[in-house]
Amino acid sequence: MRARRLFEVALVGATALALTFLLLPLIAIFLRVPLGELVAQLGSDVAVDALLVTLETTAIAQALILLVGTPTAYLIASRRFRGRALAVTLIELPLVLPPAVAGLALLAAFGRLGLLGSTFEVLGVTVSTGTKAAVVLAITYVASPFYVRGAIASFEALDQPLLDASRTLGAGPARTFFRIALPLAAKGLGAAAALSFARGIGEFGATIMFAGSLQGVTQTLSLAIYAQFDLDPDVALSLGALLVVVCAAILFTVKLLPAWTRSSSTSVYPFAPSDSS
Amino acid sequence: MDALELDIRLPLRSFRLELALALGRETFALVGPSGAGKTTVLRAVAGLARPEAGRVVLDGEVLFDTTLRIDLPPEARRVGFVFQDYALFPHMTVAQNVAYGARDRAAELLERFRISHLAGARPGELSGGERQRVGLARALARDPGVLLLDEPLSALDPHTRAALRLELKEILDELALPVLLVTHDFHDAAVLAERVAAIADGRIRQVGTPSELIAAPADAFVASFTGANVLAGRARRGADGLTEVALDGGGVVYSVDEALGDVEVAVYPWDIAISREAPHDSALNHVRGPITSFVLIGNRVRVQVGGLVGEVTAASAERLSLEEGDVVMASFKAAATRLVERAPASSGR
């Protein structure tokens, strides 16, 4: 009896410690600077520029991730082919790769003197240091695995008979994808997209290595926090507070996404009586 | 002319599916235990599984032929498939489900299957019977040349099952369409189908009407699958032109069938009479022993005596005041005793 109680206390204690540790720094951000001051600082040039750059680059990066990542995930989820495990590993690599290394690698590949730098310039896109395109690439590289991994899992969880049924009803693979697979995986895809969006908004390492930190061009919120940290800590803190709010909002959205797609099988009530009316 | 002809070979995990079938405008059932390869046959017809070799022809149109290198995709085959558990699209209404295959016939089909009032409902809100009707209506929307049913009744409880079996029977009779259905339940097959093929380990053991399979099972597998008691023994010629079988488990059984050597004796529960004393009738075979199990099913009682299951009416069980543990006599006629080949060892799985 005593031992059991002690165990309960240990569990609750550990949980309380963990939650406090996670929450304390977040609260501290809001306590360091008065709320009115926080909001006022968000109106500063640096803050507005950083917010605009972040929104623009993250939105473009996210669009690229969805557009290319969704078909990639569907292919990997629905087929078994040689090299599939390798492909999945490659997709997940940016998760564990240090962002600074990712930035360096992007520089080596797409920078002016890099592998493909000249090719891109011919196409009229300059991605070298100091351009928004570079920020977009950095974010896409680092954030994409969060979406693609989740998308693969969502497509794999689909009930195969539903896809088969669609085919036998005259729908080709493309119509089956758009009418059945996509709507049924929508919830999982949405959650995965939100995670990659949150990761993209906070991107720092790869961006600073590859794109640099030019206010109004490549300076995203995270980079602005770093740049303002020495110049004006209040601005850094208000930008930090903004990111906390945005990221928390994204996480909540993911958790509260409508649950109408939760059942992928129609046999929820295997013993439902027949209505013979 | 046969509406559907197939002859396919397809390696599965632990055996090869090798099967040839031809069916006309009839309901044909493939019956066999789970894992016998039944569903794979349907998938091969629909284009969802690809045989290693063979041919599938529907109404003269070649759907699949390895020598001609023809393999039409599922969407190009005129095949209606009703999946196990129906596989209705959960994010669509009943009307959208039925209209998925062909928009123009949806209203007519909803009407015909008496589900118009459910047009706006989602599959999750439907009962088992309603789901079955939606699944059938949806599969018929494209005007298929053959209807495939995969374990149509397996998702249901016994009570619902009996009612839906009859409903399905009526629907299939009205369709006048070739129907190929698979089930692991011989009783379902016997009610629904005109012809039945017993299948085990990817091969057909016997094809015939349900009563043919019961009257003359080709082997012990078919006999036990159709519900017979199966006892192993050794046959030799006996007196009066009868065959005498010494059972492996002890005792002797007489049969009018001729056989020699290792055989299995098949006798159906409804051919076994249960009595307190040896009856004064022509039955030659008697097994005496205690009742080891006594199960009331509706108006019948299944009584197990020794290795045999007999069926008696509930009324006569009451008249004899039978109870578990009572020592009784199970009797059956030599004429009701079929001698069949021993099943190959592999079907014991």
Image (spheres, rainbow, N blue to C red):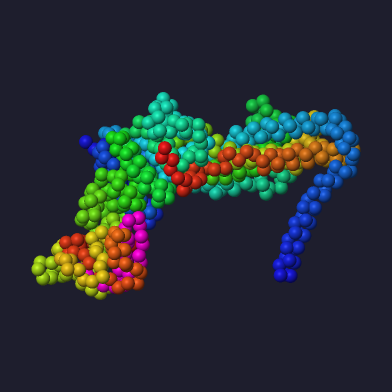
Work out which residue is located at the far front of the displayed protein and give it.
B319
Q: Is residue B293 left or right of residue A53?
A: left
Query: Height in image: B223 above or below A64?
Result: below
Q: Position of residue B344 (x, y in %)?
A: 28, 62
In percent of the image, x 35 and y 41: which residue is there?
B167
Q: Quadrant of the N terminus of chain A?
A: bottom right
Q: Is residue A176 left or right of residue B207?
A: right
**Magenta stretch contains residue B143:** no
Work out which residue is located at the far bottom of the displayed protein and give it.
B250
Q: Position of residue A237 (x, y in %)?
A: 85, 40
Of B61 and B128, the residue lying toward us:
B128
Q: Is residue B30 left or right of residue A258?
A: left
- Number of numbered markers: 0
In percent of the image, x 22 and y 56: which residue is there?
B218
Q: Main secondary structure of the magenta part?
A: strand
Q: Position of residue B278 (x, y in %)?
A: 21, 71
Image quadrant in which you'd find residue B128 = top left
Query: Height in image: B228 above or below B97?
Result: below
Q: For residue B316, say whether it is visible.
A: yes
Of B57 and B226, the residue lying toward us:
B226
Of A243 and B175, the residue lying toward us:
B175
In percent of the image, x 21 and y 55: which residue is there?
B215
Of B57 and B36, the residue lying toward us:
B36
What stretch of residues is rendered in magenta?
B284-306
Q: Position of residue B68 (x, y in %)?
A: 30, 37
Image quadrant in which you'd find residue B61 = top left
Q: Quadrant of the C terminus of chain A?
A: top left
